[in-house]
Image: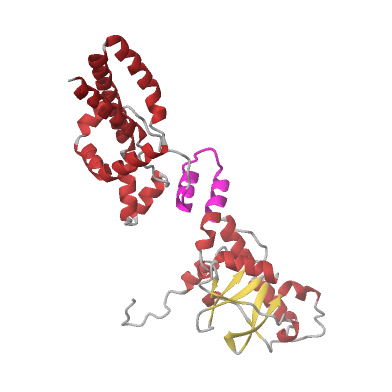
Amino acid sequence: MFIFLLSLIVIVFILLLFVAAISPERSKLSLFELERRVAMGHETAKKSLERQKLLGDVLSLQKVISALLLVVLVLLLSATLGWFIGVLISVFVALEYGGLSQVSFIKKIAQKIYNKIDEKLIKFIKNAPLLMRLLSSVPVDNDDRQIDSRQELQYLIDESKDILTFEEKSLIVNGLSFGDKKVKSIMTPRSVINSIKNTEFLGPLTLDELHKIGHSRLPVVKGDIDHIVGILNLRSLLALDIKKSTTAEKAMESKVYYINENQALDKALAAFLKTRHHLFVVVNEFRETVGLLSLEDVIEALLGRKIIDEFDTHDDLRVVALRNSSGKNHPEKYEDF
């Protein structure tokens, strides 16, 4: 009988060490990011989210099992070795089993066993909500301030309440989404581009008309808008001797920079800084002109607010383009795809 009880003591003690050595896996991602990925259909994230939400229950169950094993061990020691010696050894075990459970080979074996029963344990916890509500005693703080995506950072900014002003929030949020925006989303559309022919003489009447247009720079075309040969800076024409009429081709800047409509805005900004130019011609895959992009457009997209320019007569040329588009390509019978 003594040998049997001694064997039980050893078995219970080993079980106590293994249970205490288990470290339930925590997700490296925050709850927000896990939920975002689950919404996108990631199965791995779904399992990780379930484990993370039940982590408190797992730790509580671990704590309860450890306590029960410790009580059984105390009773066995007392019954086998007597109350006095049993209590002394029990106190020693209670003080030292936590440290002993952290020995590397014990933790390694315990973790392997836990990984095998992990799914069954999660299933048990889900099927016993009332029991876990009674046993639950370990709160888990999932708000670890870890940020795993731009979407999560944007969410935190939106929820910052009075910590940030509206302007500060707008600046940060626009900065976060800046690289995702394309040139075509902010360019001045082809339908509202004002241009001047390369052979046009810049006499007093022409100069007056150009200034009334309300833009500081105009593309100079040879034939049509798909053949831009230069950029005319109207501000530089203020010093032009109107007595000596000249053509737009002679007064223009012949260097023209092009950018594809699907280019990202952060790349466009880098190109503006590299070329030190203020206006790009936006083209599609067929090298057709589809719009114009100014440095001002890019800065406005980055800041999230309009830059007031005394040369601009329209608040938003894209709105003008939409307003002017009514009646275009609308025959009696048509179908959009």
Task: Classify 45 as above or below 260.
Answer: above
| Count of labels in the image | 0
- The quarter of the displayed image where residue 241 is located: bottom right
Residue 177, percent from left and from top: 51, 57
Q: Residue at x 27, y 20 (%)?
A: 71
Magenta span: helix, strand or loop, mainly? Answer: helix
Question: Does residue 259 appear anywhere in the picture?
Answer: yes
Q: Is residue 67 left or right of residue 289?
A: left
The front one of 191 and 34 is 34
The front one of 32 and 321 is 32
The front one of 196 and 115 is 115
The residues colored magenta run 148-174
Q: Is residue 266 left or right of residue 20?
A: right
Q: Is residue 306 left or right of residue 57?
A: right
Residue 22, percent from left and from top: 35, 36
Q: Is residue 47 magenta?
A: no
- The quarter of the displayed image where residue 313 is located: bottom right
Q: Residue at x 43, y 79 (%)?
A: 328
